[in-house]
Amino acid sequence: MRSPDLIALGEFKPSDQWQTHVNSIFYGIKGPEIHNHFQTYVSLDHRLAYALAEDFFKQTVGKKPEGRVWTIQEWGVGNGNLAGCFLSRLQEIDFNQQVYPFIHYILCDESEEILKGARANLRLQKHEGRFSTVKIDAEHLDCFRSNSVTKIISNEIWDDLATKVLLKKENQFYEEYLCPHLPPDFPGVNEKVFLQQFLNKDLRELAQRPSFLEAIHWERDFQRVELSDWPFSNILQKHSQNLKDEIPTPVNTGAFAALKKARELLAPDNLGYTGFDYGMLDLKDLNQEGRPYFNLYGGQYTFMVNFPLLEEVGREIGFSEVNREYQNDFVKRSLDSEVSGVVDLVQNHPQAANMLGWDRDILMLRTLQALNTVYHSPYPVKLEYPPMPGTPKKQRKQILQLAKNLSARGVPDTVAYVTKEEVFAALKPLRKLGYREKDIESAFHSKPLPVSFIHIQFKD
Ligand SMILES: C[S@@+](CC[C@H](N)C(=O)[O-])C[C@H]1O[C@@H](n2cnc3c(N)ncnc32)[C@H](O)[C@@H]1O
């Protein structure tokens, strides 16, 4: 039902249509500012990129690439930190210059604003001559030669790509429809020209307007649908037999299209397509009642990834070897140690759940400070930690002071990976903050949630 006083910005349409519409506006006007709205495991930290580089090195050292070039493509590149850290690590471990000099790393993104930001990334700039950038939509990568790419990587792009939502009830299928609305007093909402700019994705004009994406209110509706018109409908029909009634299930059709393109682009001696994203690892997670299926970050619209279905589609496309696991397990293998994100450690503090937001911020900053007594980052970075709106004056001052004093060689981000050894080496200052050994243990061994960060690898 439409709320009577909200202004509709269009008609109800299947979720994938509005989601991709607002996401291309979001990335098109924000560029690298996206990370003011969310951090990812690769946007500041280096450890996931290092794990990928080490894996790549192991598989290529001593081999000769076809045409003397190892071509790597990354799809959906954000601020370019993954590419920069990947190349730096590869250069560092390639003592005998057997791999790095033959690399061509192509950063592909649909947003020119994002690519501009990535090109300005100092970590990436060190690798001039080894990389290039291409503006392209990952669902329609038509500008590359088939069978020409060695390896494809993506982190948190599938959740942005077109996604339909399926609901099963008494053997009938329903699809989610969305419609964006703005409050009637939002500046400019009644101007015909604003509506035209929004519908035409007129980025230059929209960028000058007050931030309207965050203010969008999404109305939802489920309508009857036949699956026969959907991509990979046979696979989907089979998949749906295992779904419980009335639990919204994402069907990531954009990720299917990207996977199909990957299969075409990968060369005969390829190392596959490696993706990381946020979603459901298995059927049990898919069928978990009340599990979220979408998220909004500063106006960006993301859907969780249905990994069991993605695997089934990958196999149908022709990938014979598909492996999925928790992302932590991938990083753990590379570091040969248990790992946790700092944010998970803070969540396991005995008082964290009862703290006010700003007190939790102070705990986070003090935890970072404690870890920094042992952690040494290979890259100098000043972690930005602005107090959240509404923070009282006293705590605000404290947050600003603590953030200012953080070491530039310390833990680079609140989601950065830390090892169990590092955390136990900082046990003394952590104890002073109220952590007990059992809290630290639980941060490393907590039961994964039905929506988690997953690593999946597709190979021939
Ligand atoms: C959530 S951000 C992740 C960025 C980066 N991989 C990271 O993890 O920090 C998604 C990225 O995918 C890009 N993107 C979104 N839709 C795309 C599409 N259809 N084709 C290519 N890139 C896309 C965005 O511009 C953005 O750079």
Image: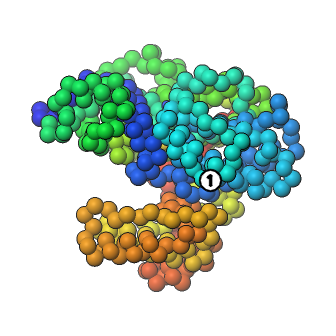
Q: Is residue 229 above or below residue 23?
A: above
Instruction: From the viewer's side, name the closer residue of 215 and 440.
Output: 215
Q: Which residue is found at the position 50% from the left and 35% from the top?
A: 112
Mark 1 CB near ligand 1 (8 Å cut)? no
Q: Which residue is found at the position 54% from the left and 84% from the top?
A: 428
Which residue, given by chain and number where applicable, does mark 1 sit on?
Answer: 123
**Neighbours of disc 1 within 10 Å: few (<14), some (14-19), many (20+):** some
Work out which quarter of the rendered image holds the N terminus and state it. Answer: top left
Circle 1 sits in a helix, a strand or a loop, which is it?
A: helix
Is residue 25 in view from this perspective?
A: yes
Instruction: From the viewer's side, name the closer residue of 434 and 383.
Output: 383
Q: Amino acid at mark 1?
A: Arg
Instruction: From the viewer's side, name the closer residue of 66 and 315.
Output: 66
Q: Is residue 175 left or right of residue 422?
A: left
Instruction: From the viewer's side, name the closer residue of 451 and 98.
Output: 98
Across and down, in percent, residue 29 comes to: 39, 38
Image quadrant in which you'd find residue 107: top right
Image quadrant in which you'd find residue 288: top left
Across and down, in percent, residue 291 comes to: 38, 45
**Residue found at the far left of this picture:** 4
Is residue 353 in view from this perspective?
A: no
Q: Is residue 131 left or right of residue 410?
A: right
Q: Which residue is found at the position 63% from the left and 29% from the top?
A: 262
Across and down, in percent, residue 11 comes to: 25, 23
Colour mapping used in the image: rainbow
Q: Is residue 370 above or below residue 59?
A: below
Across and down, in percent, residue 409 comes to: 58, 69
**Residue found at the far top of this picture:** 229
Q: How many marks?
A: 1
Q: Which residue is found at the position 57% from the left and 78% from the top?
A: 373
